[in-house]
Image (cartoon, rainbow, N blue to C red):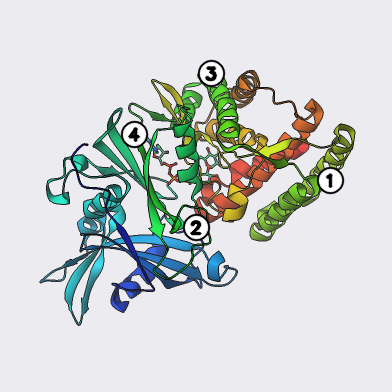
Amino acid sequence: MSGVSPARTVHVSPGAAHLPPEVLALLDTWLPEQRWYPVPAEGVTHEPWLTVTFGGVADVVVALLRLAGPGLATGDGALVIQVPLVLTPTAEPEADTADTEAAGLIGTVTTASGTATVHDGGVHPAAWHAYFTAALPAACEPEDCAELRDARRISGEQSNTSVVLPALPHASGRGGMLKILRTVALGPHPDVVIPEALTRAGWDGVPRFLGAVPLPAPPGTATGTNAGPDVLAHLAVLSELVHDATDGFELACAYAARGEDFGERAAELGAVVAHLHSALRDALGPGPTLEAAGFMGVLRRRAAEAFADVPDLAPQRAGVTALYDAVSARLAAAGERAGGLVRLQSIHGDLHLGQALHSPDGWKVLDFEGEPQRPVAERTAPDLPLRDVAGMLRSLDYAGAVGSATDPHWVSHAQLAFLEGYRQGSESVGDTLDVATAELLLRALTVDKALYEVVYEFRHRPAWMHIPLTAVERVLAS
Ligand SMILES: Nc1ncnc2c1ncn2[C@@H]1O[C@H](COP(=O)(O)OP(=O)(O)O)[C@@H](O)[C@H]1O
Ligand SMILES: O=P(O)(O)O[C@H]1O[C@H](CO)[C@@H](O[C@H]2O[C@H](CO)[C@@H](O)[C@H](O)[C@H]2O)[C@H](O)[C@H]1O
């Protein structure tokens, strides 16, 4: 794209600037119904924190709202959601119908300055255009924009809002994926920092990073973050579209449903995850040495939270405590023997089959924001690569259950093949754990992940809660 305008500027104002109270009132009822809304809505209120607009774009306004309510952090630690809106002046209020709802109509408001329709920017081309032209220099305006041809939002169980831009040109071809981050955290966003670092290092196991939309600090504030000069956070990320790709979870479920062995695909994926871990270590450097007491403290705290949230977990409490006690003792002994344990490093953090795309160029790994239900500081902290291994083992179990595999060995075979692929693809870095300690830790991390999943299913898909619940029981019994 030569001879085009520079990337669009992003402006930020404090509070609810540009947003009349009538619009905020509409959002109060609409937001809790959205799939990406991050917490149970009961008792939660939405406090305008910042408002974002884009240079030269009159109708797109992005509300950044802090969630306030029982059990939620406040101040700089507050959970912030990003709500892009398209406000269009109109003569007549638009009727709410199934069609208008599908087109993203949130409602119509009448204020002192007139009547306007309020559309969800997540499904609106005017907002998509504003975002991608803030990430990349653009060639055209939304009305005649060739880059927007055939653009569509991905539907489904997403924590964020992703938009396919099949016609977007870039250095190595055509097609982009715009991801509007629904939860905005202060500081550099891992879904920007990690793909950017891996792309810069030339690793091709991630979709190539094309650009990002930063949130500038409001005038007169110090950023206090490392996201770059005057950048408070990230709002969106643009990457290359992986063509002819199949979602890894759908692929594995289809294999399970057909009773077809997934071993070869799982082994390839295991090798890619091993290469991902070396690429992350090379690109971002090694982290500190594992500190066993702190590490196990986090596992125990997460388990306590899961038990508090989901009463059905109560019978597993003693087993989880016993397993974690065994791991603590083992880590203490291993640390004494080896004079220190393994080094932590940057990892994926929420790895499952749905975060891997199978394409003609092999597996591509997506979505580096970590577990959406975890505090940001925890999600981005250096961690054990085994956590990602545990995530994939759990996901293969889900695929067997959702794909109704009739072969009782379908899951264990795929899991063993994944582990073997991972082992073969791993580079020795000198400071590895002994096999028995690594196996015990992997069991603990698998339980930790399954407990997270029980809470996730309890909140979002209660009909699937039995999948991780059974897994907790099974791993503890093994
Ligand atoms: N670069 C890409 N090329 C093709 N498809 C992609 C790309 N990035 C994401 N996807 C698809 O979009 C879905 C959602 O992306 P993801 O980053 O996992 O979002 P979320 O955080 O909302 O789950 C993925 O499961 C995948 O199917
Ligand atoms: O992809 P996200 O970052 O939104 O991750 C969240 O949602 C996932 C489900 O969409 C959830 O994954 C769980 O269900 C998957 C099947 O749908 C399964 O393959 C995973 O193993 C299981 O963890 C993920 O935990 C959650 O963070």
Give the amino acid at mark 1.
Asp
> Circle 4 sits in a helix, a strand or a loop, which is it?
loop
Q: Name the amino acid, label 4.
A: Leu
Residue 391 vs residue 195, the one in the foreground: 195
Query: Mark 4 or mark 3, which has the lower sequence index?
Result: 4
Residue placed under numbered mark 1 in the picture: 325
| Residue ID for mark 3 | 261
Q: Residues at badges 2 and 1 in contact (C-beta under 8 Å)?
A: no
Q: Is residue 82 left or right of residue 2?
A: right
The C terminus lies in which quarter of the figure?
A: top right
- For image coordinates 49% across by 33% down, the residue present is 198
Q: Earlier in the sequence, mark 2 or mark 1?
A: 2
Q: Position of residue 29 (x, y in %)?
A: 37, 69
**Dot 3 beta carbon under 8 Å from ligand 2:** no
Mark pair 4, 2: CA separation: 25 Å
Using residue 224 as the reference point, say whether residue 469 is left or right of it.
Answer: right
Residue 460 in view: yes
Rounded to the nearest angstrom, the CA distance separating label 2 from label 1 is: 34 Å
What is the quadrant of residue 411 in the picture?
A: top right
* Element carrying mark 1: helix
Q: Give whichever of discs 4 and 1 has the lower sequence position.
A: 4
* x and y, in percent, of residue 470 in the image: 66, 41
Q: Residue furthest left?
A: 91
What residue does disc 2 label? 185
SS state under label 3 = loop
Disc 2 Cβ-to-ligand 1 distance below 8 Å = no
Q: Disc 4 designates what residue?
A: 241
Which residue is painted at 80% across and 32% down in the image? 437
Mark closer to the chain start, 4 or 2: 2
Q: Can the viewer see residue 374?
A: no
Q: How many dots with numbers?
A: 4
